[in-house]
Amino acid sequence: MHWINAVAIFIMIGSGWKIYNDDVILGWLHFPDSIVIGKWAQYGLQWHFFGMWIFVLNGLAYLTYGIATGRFRQKLFPVSLRDILSTVNDALHFRLAHDDLTHYNAVQKILYLGVMTIGVLIVISGLALWKPVQFSELAALFGSFQATRVVHFLCMTAIVGFLLVHISLALLVPQSLVAMVTGGPVVDEGSAHPAEAAAEAEATH
Amino acid sequence: MSIRTRTPSIFRPRNTVDQGVLTQNRALLDDINRRNVLRGAISLGALSLLTGCDVSEDDSVQKVLRTVSAWNDRVQATIFRPHHLAPTYSASQVVKPPRFNAYYDIEDVKPIDGATWKLELAGRIDNKQPWTAQQIYQLPEQEIIIKHICVEGWDYIGQWSGPNLRDFLQRVGADLTAKYVYFICNDDYTESIDMATALHPQTILATKYAGDVLADPFGYPLRLRTSTKLGYKNAKWIKAIEVTNDFRETFWSKQGFNWFAGI
């Protein structure tokens, strides 16, 4: 699901930049032709309205799976302010632990939850842009059509920002990439928690 | 290495793959260091930049993208709400003059002589008698103050008036069960809309903008204005209307823009 999403996001951002270029929101910001998807406006639009199905269907499957199996609850919650501060502190002292890739630190939890929320918002604002009349009740939540464009654009900016951090950090910890391809490290079925596993190990010695 | 219990996953088999292969190929795995990964990623990026290719125009890619676009037409027709009205605005919000848009510049507009112009009717219509501008002006007028939304992303509020298209089609005895209403324009532009949109209460044949007869660049003497389509579906300088069951590609859809273009 992650890699399908990666392809969908790539298509949506590249073609979205092409569509944006036709009527820019920020006067100084045009995306160079070399990094947009689609040589002409219609190709950008075709890619965007093709990619949206992959992004939305895959996203719905992912959210349903994460919620139904309890994966999100287990991996992303709870997240407390104290954990965040301690993670930031660890990071600033270059002692972030990467030995257990199956465990997310507090900053990871916040970022993953945040980007998922942005993912939902970018779809909702996208629907309001695509169908401001058919879904006029939804579009009204954003105020005007141009305000909806700005929300959609800011969501994109947030996702691009997330990706810059996400990809750089994944490259800095290459074993995470291996884990993403192989399905992750072997996990001992017997031990419920690392602390308990450690305690067991102590006891046997 | 501290390890947590695996998250229960319906996709991950309970009996995992033999991890021995990882130990056997330790040397190879160690070789996948970050420098190589970075170097690889950078060259991949460089390669895609160097080729500078755009696959969109490739025939097989176009076939897929246009198939999805046609599928999107059907989705849009399904979610279309025939009686749901678009938001309307007050006269004080109207932009004057309206924003010009066409496939050429405003200086290249070829004005129509209203005295000799006639609206031709064709297809599944009982009374195909052509209409003069004067005859059309005598029909009951409907005024709508709606947003014009362009596929490029800009929009403005406009005040349009003229005969309601459903009323006009009924008046000339058109087959309202036909699938499409097709417009042929004086500048060789073509456009067509689905019948549900043609019968929508906010679809009119506009003859006026902000109370005055349309100016030349905005479609004088007759143009379409519907609240449920993107700007380019609103044909200007209409010279013929055909009611038909045959789907025909139109000016922009031939070039790859979405045909339904509903909003």
Image (cartoon, rainbow, N blue to C red):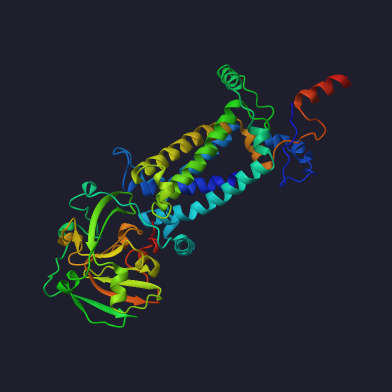
Residue drawn at (35%, 67%) of the image: B198
Q: How many marks?
A: 0
Q: Residue at x 62, y 19 (%)?
A: A95
Query: At 46% from the left edge and 37% from the top edge, which residue is drawn?
Result: A160
Q: Nearer the viewer, residue A52 or A13?
A: A52
Residue B110 location (% of width, % of height): 15, 65
Q: A75 or B176: nearer the eye? A: B176
How far across and how far down the image is residue A111, in percent? 55, 31
Find residue B22 and report its image quarter: top right
Nearer-the-camera pick, A8 or B245? B245
Q: Please give left or right for residue A179 compared with residue B14 in the image.
A: left
Residue B193, x across and y down, in percent: 36, 67
Q: Nearer the viewer, residue A154 or B142?
A: B142
Q: Is residue A168 left or right of residue B25?
A: left
Where on the picture, by quarter, is residue B66?
bottom left
Residue A64 vertical placement versus A92 (above, below): below
> Which quarter of the image is occupied by the N terminus of chain B?
top right
User: Which quarter of the image is occupied by the C terminus of chain B?
Assistant: bottom left
State whether residue A144 is above or below residue B165.
Answer: above
Lateral position of residue B194 relative to residue A81, left or right: left
Say if residue A36 shows up in the picture: no
Q: Position of residue B178 (x, y in %)?
A: 40, 76
Give above or below for B149 relative to B253.
above
Q: Quadrant of residue B205?
A: bottom left
Residue found at the far front of this picture: B140
